[in-house]
Image (cartoon, grey):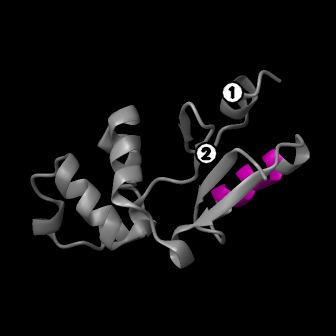
Amino acid sequence: MSDLTLYGIKACDTMKKARTWLETHGQPYTLHDYKSMGIEQVRLEQWCNEHGWEKILNRAGTTFRKLDDASKADLDQTKAIGLMLAQPSMIKRPVLDLGQCTLVGFKPELYQNAFNL
């Protein structure tokens, strides 16, 4: 069993890149797919406290852009977490849980630094 958990949506292109990187570099992981497994509020709160809700909420994605203006107005951490719980596809992906910290998004150099490669 792996200590690494990769959070996201299985079909996402960026997720595929992260999974390929982990597999190529011999890093076993557990996949947590928001579409089938959802996400816990406490986990979103941890990520927002670690990185800031602005980094966790994917405002560039289609799901967020389709929201009405009232839903997008006056965003704060509580409101952002509510939106992400209701529609997990609004969560920036992937989120890689390393145990002691998390990485948000995928860039090969970010992963290389995290694994000291």
Residue 81, position as x, y percentages in the image: 28, 56
Q: Is residue 7 left or right of residue 77?
A: right
Q: Residue at x 66, y 38 (%)?
A: 107
Q: Which residue is mark 2?
A: 96
Q: Is residue 106 left or right of residue 58?
A: right
Q: Is residue 110 left or right of residue 34?
A: right
Q: Are marks 2 and 1 in contact (CB under 8 Å)?
A: yes
Residue that badge 1 annotates? 114
Q: Give the magenta-colored segment's residue range.
A: 14-22
Q: Residues within 10 Å of mark 2 (few under 14, many from 20)?
A: many
Q: Amino acid at mark 1?
A: Ala
Q: Amino acid at mark 2?
A: Leu
Mark 1 element type: helix
Numbered disc 2: secondary structure: strand
- The residue shown at (70%, 34%) is 111
Q: Is residue 18 magenta?
A: yes
The residue at the point 35 percent across, 52 percent down is 42
In the displayed structure, 116 sits above or below 41; it is: above
